[in-house]
């Protein structure tokens, strides 16, 4: 069983930045593709970004392209999400997800992921 723990959420003003971190309890995360999703109140969970096992390729949702960057450090069993130029519509609970995959495969649907964290809250004030 793999446990994912997110951290780094908080409250910022519009235009501000945050860095979210997700640490896995697995012996190794090198076999996992990892991703971030978010869910705002009253809305469905939304794909944010994904990163393949080795760090490339990555892919981001249209609403965050150019502002959010996903990266990973397999030695630290961590995936990061840098959030820049945050806007009120980015406010949500952000979830880390992971699933085993081969080589450069990436997924963008929540059904593809077996393991989920508890989420970290991001609040953005205008």
Image (spheres, helix red, strand yellow):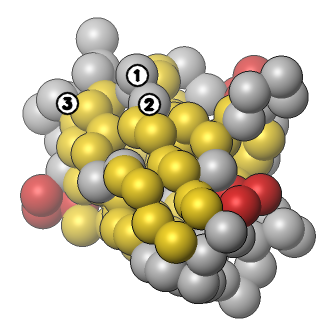
Residue in view at x 27 percent, y 21 percent: 3
Which badge, 3 or 2, is on the more N-terminal residue? 3
99 with respect to 117 (left or right): right
Q: Is residue 76 something that shows in the picture?
A: yes
Q: Residue farthest to the bottom? A: 66
Label 3: which secondary element: loop
Contact (CB < 8 A) between labels 2 and 1? yes
- Local crowd size for mark 2, using a 10 Å CA cut-off: few (<14), some (14–19), many (≥20): many
Q: Is residue 34 above or below residue 72?
A: above
Residue occupied by mark 1? 118
Residue occupied by mark 2? 119
**Percent position of residue 17, x then y:** 45, 77
Image quarter of the N terminus = top left
24 with respect to 58 (left or right): left
Residue in view at x 71 percent, y 61 percent: 88
Foreground residue, 5 or 89?
A: 89
Q: Is residue 70 above or below residue 106?
A: below
**Percent position of residue 96, x then y:** 47, 39
Which badge, 1 or 3, is on the more N-terminal residue? 3
Q: Nearer the viewer, mark 3 or mark 2?
A: 2
**Percent position of residue 19, x then y:** 36, 68
Please give the label number shown on residue 26: 3
Q: Is residue 68 something that shows in the picture?
A: no
Foreground residue, 22 or 56?
A: 22
Which quadrant would residue 110 be assigned to in this image? top right
Q: Is residue 65 above or below residue 92?
A: below
């Amino acid at each position: 069983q793999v446990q994912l723990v997110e951290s780094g959420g908080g409250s910022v003003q519009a235009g501000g930045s945050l860095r979210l971190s997700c640490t896995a309890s697995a012996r190794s995360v090198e076999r996992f593709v990892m991703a971030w999703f978010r869910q705002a109140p009253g809305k469905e969970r939304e794909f944010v970004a994904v990163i393949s096992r080795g760090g490339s390729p990555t892919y981001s949702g249209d609403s965050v392209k150019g502002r959010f960057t996903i990266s990973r450090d397999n030695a630290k069993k961590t995936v990061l999400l840098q959030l820049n130029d945050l806007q009120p519509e980015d406010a949500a609970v952000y979830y880390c997800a992971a699933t085993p995959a081969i080589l450069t495969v990436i997924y963008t649907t929540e059904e593809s992921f077996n393991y989920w964290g508890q989420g970290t809250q991001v609040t953005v004030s205008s």
